[in-house]
Image (cartoon, rainbow, N blue to C red):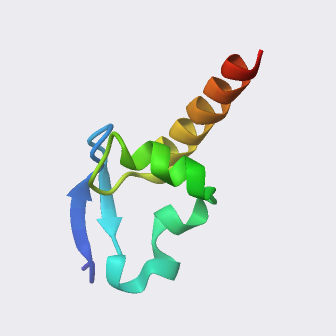
Amino acid sequence: MTKHEIIACERCQSRIECKANSFTKCHCSEVQLTHDEIEHIAENYEGCLCATCLLELRQEYQKSLSITVS
């Protein structure tokens, strides 16, 4: 039995266990994001995202920076 709410990732709809009340144990805390990366993601998403989507969005953001600089 889970102690936390099971929700859908806003981006991919995969089921994730939200541990907002135990943030350090939550899957999303495993993904280290810069302030700029967080702002970029927050422009498009309001809800929880799974770690896989956070990693993909971080990579997309970093890639967009290299395209802009080139």
Counting from the top left corner in percent of width and height, residue 34 is at 63, 56
How many callouts does the rendering have?
A: 0
Residue in view at x 61 percent, y 25 percent = 64
Nearer to me, 14 or 65: 65
Residue 20: x and y in percent read: 34, 77
Q: Residue furthest right?
A: 70
Which quarter of the rendering shows the N terminus? bottom left
The residue lying at 44 percent from left, 79 percent from top is 23
Observer-nearest of 65 and 24: 65
Left or right of 5? Residue 42 is right
Q: Residue at x 32, y 37 (%)?
A: 12
Q: Quadrant of residue 61?
A: top right
User: Viewed as shown, does residue 63 lie left or right of 56?
Assistant: right
Residue 59 position (above or below residue 34): above
Depicted 42 relative to depicted 70: above or below: below
Above or below for 40 versus 46: above
Taking depth in this image into account, of 24 and 62 the one nearest to the observer is 62
Quadrant containing the C terminus in the rendered view = top right
Q: Is residue 30 left or right of residue 50?
A: right
Q: Is residue 70 left or right of residue 28?
A: right
- Looking at this view, name the residue that lies furthest to the front: 69
Quadrant position of residue 4 = bottom left
* Picture layout, residue 54 above or below residue 60: below
Q: Residue, x 45% and y 72% (percent of image)?
A: 26
